[in-house]
Image (cartoon, grey):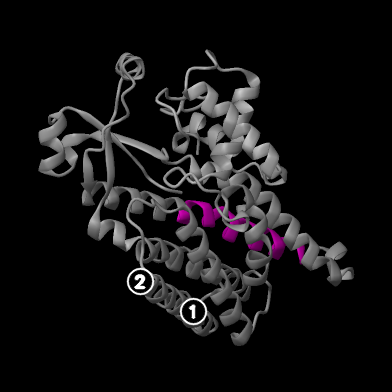
């Protein structure tokens, strides 16, 4: 993100009001815009140069070109490291990366082997995305990552296979209801394992804490810029890390809910129509279309649930942080995505 580039002057966080949900949704839609994937290395360097020029005071005001440069940088660079996130694991590629995997998990009539393979594939992708977009002020070890991966895979496969075995035994529900419940099994597996995956992959942050910074007012920022001072690191906070990881886990569930619920329910209805009965080969493209359409709208709505740059009162964190800014002081930290 733009915050990782050199320069004392701080960029406006967004064109939109990030204190409101819809402002964050509009900002998230920009970060998740797939068109940024097609920006070349030269285009990225040009955007970085333009942002750096602003942060160093060489450009005085925000222009349409600067906002576009910020969009490119924010969707490409990690806010902690300043390095490009590997393309398939960027939020701008999330819909594309998840499309085939989600379609595989939602395939009607999936057998045990298929269920296992698609759940393993999905959790592998989740681990990669969570790792690539996590707060990097507290790196995770390879051994912890491997352990978290196997625990998440075990959880998702256990839930999926367990519910697949349970649903057919429900004798008091109608066949139609049983069909719907069967189609919702992947959602239960993905939602539970997805949240667990975030906690496991980012557990090191909770154990060691993440970097916390004072939240400055516009006048304080202007004064710091004038004096050439950077933002002071207040230290690491385990409580801030717990908030960051919990909000990220919840946003994953919020994102999975419409994607894993709406397409299978709609497909059940469509499969009863004469048009689709006469064209069974169209089930797969219709399923893909439903998943793609839902994903495009669901991702910004889920990402916007919580600010990426979280701002809270210091009294909610450790005593060491409170002593530096006071109980009523405001602090902020990178939540991760």
Magenta-drawn stretch contains 258: yes
Seen at 42% across and 54% down, the residue is 134
Seen at 57% across and 51% down, the residue is 90
Question: Does 23 sit left or right of 135 as displayed?
Answer: right
Disc assigned to residue 93:
none
- In the image, which residues are magenta? 252-271
Which quadrant of the structure image shows residue 264?
bottom right
* Spot occupied by residue 98 in the image (x, y as percentages of width and height): 62, 60
Residue matched to label 2: 144
Cα–Cα span, label 2 and label 1: 20 Å
Seen at 44% across and 28% down, the residue is 7
- Near-viewer residue (328 or 221): 221
Q: Is residue 234 above or below residue 124?
A: above
- Near-viewer residue (163 or 324): 324
* Spot occupied by residue 106 in the image (x, y as percentages of width and height): 64, 69
- Near-viewer residue (254 or 145): 145
Q: Is residue 286 above or below residue 163?
A: above
Residue matched to label 1: 157
Question: Does 94 sit left or right of 19 as displayed?
Answer: right
Does dot 1 land on a helix, a strand or a loop? helix
Which quadrant of the structure image shows residue 310?
top left
Q: Main secondary structure of the magenta part?
A: helix
Question: Does 308 sit left or right of 42 as displayed?
Answer: left
* Spot occupied by residue 149 in the image (x, y as percentages of width and height): 44, 73
Marks 2 and 1, the one that precedes in the sequence: 2
């Amino acid at each position: 993100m733009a915050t990782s580039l050199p320069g004392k002057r701080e960029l406006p966080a967004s064109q939109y009001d990030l204190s409101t949900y819809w402002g964050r949704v509009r900002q998230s839609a920009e970060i998740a815009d797939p068109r940024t994937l097609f920006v070349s290395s030269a285009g990225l360097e040009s955007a970085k140069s333009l942002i750096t020029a602003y942060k160093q005071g060489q450009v005085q005001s925000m222009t349409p070109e600067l906002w576009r440069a910020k969009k490119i940088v924010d969707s490409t660079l990690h806010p902690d490291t300043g390095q490009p996130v590997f393309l398939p694991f960027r939020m701008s590629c999330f819909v594309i990366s998840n499309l085939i995997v989600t379609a595989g998990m939602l395939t009607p009539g999936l057998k045990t082997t298929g269920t296992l393979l698609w759940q393993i594939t999905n959790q592998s992708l989740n681990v990669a995305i969570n790792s690539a977009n996590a707060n990097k002020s507290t790196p995770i070890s390879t051994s912890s990552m491997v352990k978290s991966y196997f625990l998440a895979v075990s959880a998702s496969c256990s839930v999926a296979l367990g519910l697949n075995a349970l649903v057919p035994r429900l004798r008091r529900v109608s066949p139609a209801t049983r069909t719907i419940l069967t189609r919702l099994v992947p959602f239960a597996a993905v939602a539970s394992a997805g949240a667990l995956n975030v906690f496991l992959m980012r557990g090191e942050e909770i154990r060691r804490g993440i970097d916390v910074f004072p939240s400055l007012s516009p006048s304080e920022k202007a004064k710091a810029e004038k004096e050439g001072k950077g933002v002071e690191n207040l230290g690491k906070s385990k409580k801030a890390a717990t908030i960051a990881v919990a909000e990220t886990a919840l946003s994953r569930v919020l994102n999975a809910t419409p994607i894993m619920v709406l397409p299978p329910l709609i497909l059940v209805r469509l499969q009863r129509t004469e048009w689709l009965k006469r064209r069974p080969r169209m089930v797969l493209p219709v399923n893909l279309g439903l998943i793609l359409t839902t994903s495009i709208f669901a991702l910004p709505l889920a990402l916007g649930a919580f600010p990426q740059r979280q701002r809270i009162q210091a009294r909610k964190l450790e005593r060491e942080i409170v002593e530096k800014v006071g109980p009523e002081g405001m602090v902020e930290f990178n939540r991760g995505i």
